[in-house]
């Protein structure tokens, strides 16, 4: 084990290199985006701008999306075509709208808008997704931490809270390759969600299935489909499911969807008709033309796997080499998704992020994995390997390890 002076000297060497490295967000790299250049050329003239039922995609209308795109998402998610609504390019936008709609107009006939309650709360599995937490914080919704286990959220806690507390109106979930741990909900956890008996009639689970086809292994995790499971218990109205092609094609020009019961979708569409006269159907048509079957999706994601998997593997390898001597450091190794979680000794994560930034490496802020940006243990960092190149990661990972060692030894020194 290196002494503190040796670690400081190594850190200063990194700092002197004037590095500019970024692992702060789970963005696709340029080589991933290049795999779908055909998306730009598949519709090139007016005669190609018609959907399979003759809809002119250049014009207004078709508020809930063209049938080809509904059918594609239905296959991806394992739901019925009439349970799918197509949005714009962002599933996060659909989630924001769903919360906003609930705040102003409620989720159920006979129930007040959420804004009319003195207090409402959301359950937030932690570690979790910072943008989910940002939406609820924006609307002034109280957030309650629920521990995230390798098989999903602590369901004993979820069941107890929603059955006893009528102020709890929602729960965030990333059920497959969860952001940021990479955990996938077990069949048991999915079934327990499907069987929930919330005290609040207007309770909804926001099921963000962002990584449903984003595997990193030939033997990927399997996720039980939530809507069909919930129907067994008469609970299909409890769920809003979201997905998009943002990390399949172009994040800035993908297609998003919401899947839900017909009752829920009819309520959403009734609101949307005041909001828009239709989303970008040309973009929907482009996607439908290059992804005619689920096999086309599988082939596309196989290319992504070959580009992304080595990035995860190089960081794992460097962490194992550099951090093996620290028994109180661990990290997840998911079978898919865009992130993994790094678990550090208590009260070191913020310092690691600060040291990394000062040496030219930007990582996700410590605390981003928890509501209000407050990790009570100050011990978790989300690692996002997809955007940098392999060469950049071969520098970024050792630098991050150096910052970790620096923070740990410094923390021990300060305590003594």
Image (cartoon, rainbow, N blue to C red):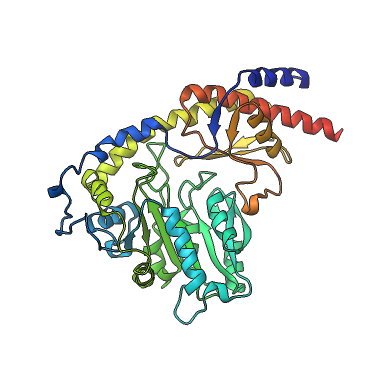
- Where residue 357 appears, as percent x and y from the top left, is 63, 31
The reply, left or right, for residue 321 in relation to residue 80 is right
Specify the quadrant that holds the C terminus: top right
- Does residue 270 lie above or below 185 as drawn? below
- Where residue 62 appears, as percent x and y from the top left, is 25, 63
Q: Residue furthest right?
A: 416
- Where residue 313 appears, as percent x and y from the top left, is 49, 29
Answer with the quarter of the image where residue 332 lies.
top right
Task: Report the front residue among 80 and 108.
Answer: 108
Q: Residue at x 46, y 59 (%)?
A: 95
The reply, left or right, for residue 299 in relation to residue 229 is left
Instruction: Note whether residue 154 is visible.
Output: no
Task: Report the front residue among 66 and 78.
Answer: 66
Task: Report the front residue among 147 and 268.
Answer: 268
- Where residue 243 appears, as percent x and y from the top left, is 39, 53
Q: Residue at x 68, y 21 (%)?
A: 11
Instruction: Note whether residue 383 is visible.
Output: yes
- Does residue 283 lie above or below 20 as drawn? below
Specify the quadrant that holds the N terminus: top right
């Amino acid at each position: 084990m290196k002494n503190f002076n040796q670690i400081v000297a190594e850190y200063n060497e990194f700092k002197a290199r004037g590095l500019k490295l970024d692992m702060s967000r789970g963005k696709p790299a340029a080589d991933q985006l290049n795999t779908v250049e055909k998306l730009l050329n598949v519709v090139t003239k007016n005669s190609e701008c018609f959907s399979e039922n003759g809809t002119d995609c250049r014009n207004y209308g078709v508020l809930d999306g063209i049938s080809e795109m509904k059918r594609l998402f239905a296959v991806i998610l394992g739901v019925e075509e009439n349970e799918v609504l197509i949005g714009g390019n962002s599933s996060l936008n659909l989630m924001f709208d769903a919360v906003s709609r609930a705040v102003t107009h409620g989720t159920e006939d006979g129930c007040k808008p959420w804004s009319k309650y003195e207090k409402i709360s959301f359950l937030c599995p932690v570690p979790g997704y910072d943008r989910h937490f940002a939406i609820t914080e924006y609307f002034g919704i109280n957030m309650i931490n629920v521990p995230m286990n390798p098989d999903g959220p602590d369901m004993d806690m979820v069941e107890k809270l929603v059955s006893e507390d009528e102020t709890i109106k929602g729960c965030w979930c990333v059920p497959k390759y969860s952001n940021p741990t990479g955990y996938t909900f077990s069949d048991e956890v999915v079934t327990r969600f499907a069987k929930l008996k919330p005290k609040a009639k207007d309770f909804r689970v926001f099921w963000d299935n962002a990584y449903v086809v984003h595997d990193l292994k030939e033997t990927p995790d399997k996720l039980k489909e939530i809507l069909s499971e919930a129907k067994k218990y008469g609970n299909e109205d409890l769920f809003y499911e979201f997905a998009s092609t943002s990390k399949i094609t172009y994040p800035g020009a993908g297609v998003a969807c919401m899947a839900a019961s017909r009752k829920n979708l009819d309520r959403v569409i009734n609101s949307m008709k005041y909001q828009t006269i239709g989303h970008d159907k040309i973009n929907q048509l482009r996607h439908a033309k290059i992804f005619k079957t689920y096999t086309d999706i599988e082939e596309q994601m196989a290319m992504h796997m070959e580009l992304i998997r080595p990035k995860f593997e190089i960081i794992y390898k460097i962490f194992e080499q550099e951090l093996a001597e620290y028994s109180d450091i661990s990290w997840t190794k998911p079978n898919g998704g865009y992130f993994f979680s790094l678990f550090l000794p208590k009260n070191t994560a913020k310092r690691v992020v600060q040291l990394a930034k000062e040496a030219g490496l930007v990582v996700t802020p410590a605390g981003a994995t928890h509501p209000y940006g407050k990790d009570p243990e100050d011990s978790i960092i989300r690692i996002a390997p997809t955007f940098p190149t392999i060469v950049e990661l071969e520098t970024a990972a050792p630098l991050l390890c150096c910052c970790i060692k620096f923070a740990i030894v410094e923390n021990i020194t300060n305590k003594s």
